[in-house]
């Protein structure tokens, strides 16, 4: 994408017209519920923000912590008003926002899954239909050892569903 990992207009425009519940997981394995803000509320909060412009508030939890994203690295975290983190979220931003990941992100997420840093249910729900070239790339990933044959089989199975 160039520059920051995620663009603020992409984040804000991906939010809905109504607040939405999302379940996510912290890096220590705890399950956390959050409500995603509406597009309008997130945009208003962003307009009022004077400092720490690399962070965007996209939701909140039951105890009043903000759910924010670091535009520089795509990390999701719960924090206070000054963006001091209380919990880092391991669930990928694509899962929380219900996006289809790019092929580069899907490769990274597959590797994280293999390392035990993600669970199967944390992978993004949406999928991009791969091109013929992307399918060849995934087979080449096996050849160079980036992913296993099982990864490619699982990926193909999810795409076909």
Image: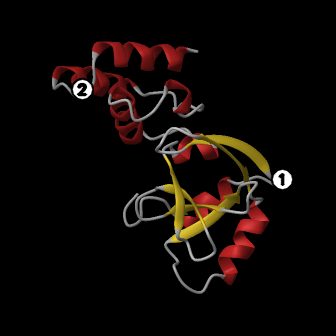
In the image as oriented, which residue stretches furthest toward the right? 18
Residue under label 1, please give it.
18
Q: Residues within 10 Å of mark 2 (few under 14, many from 20)?
A: some
Label 1, label 2: how far apart the Cα atoms are:
40 Å
- The quadrant of the picture occupied by the N terminus is bottom left
In what quadrant of the picture does the C terminus appear? top right
Q: Residues within 10 Å of mark 1 (few under 14, many from 20)?
A: few
Picture layout, residue 139 above or below residue 108? above
Q: From the viewer's perspective, is 116 left or right of 63?
A: left
Residue name at image x 66 percent, y 53 percent: 14
Q: Residue at x 48, y 64 (%)?
A: 71
Circle 1 SS class = loop
Q: Position of residue 7 (x, y in %)?
A: 51, 63
Q: Secondary structure at mark 2?
A: helix
- Residue 94 drawn at (x, y percent): 55, 43
User: Closer to the camera, 88 or 20?
Assistant: 88
Residue 141: which disc? 2
Where residue 57 appears, as percent x and y from the top left, is 63, 66
State left or right for residue 18 relative to residue 131.
Answer: right
């Amino acid at each position: 994408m160039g520059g920051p990992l995620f663009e603020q207009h992409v984040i804000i425009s991906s939010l809905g017209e109504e607040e939405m519940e999302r379940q996510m997981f912290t890096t220590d394995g705890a399950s956390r519920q959050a409500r995603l803000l509406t597009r309008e509320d997130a945009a208003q909060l962003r307009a009022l923000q004077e400092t720490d412009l690399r962070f965007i508030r996209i939701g909140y939890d039951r105890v009043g912590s903000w759910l924010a994203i670091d535009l520089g690295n795509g990390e999701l975290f719960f924090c206070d008003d000054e963006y001091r983190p209380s919990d880092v979220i391991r669930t990928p931003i694509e899962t929380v926002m219900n996006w289809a990941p790019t092929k580069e992100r899907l490769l990274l997420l597959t590797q994280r899954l293999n390392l035990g840093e993600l669970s199967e249910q944390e992978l993004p729900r949406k999928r991009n239909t791969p091109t013929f070239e992307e399918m060849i790339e995934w087979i080449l990933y096996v050849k160079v050892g980036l992913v296993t044959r099982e990864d490619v089989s699982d990926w193909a199975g999810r795409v076909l569903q």
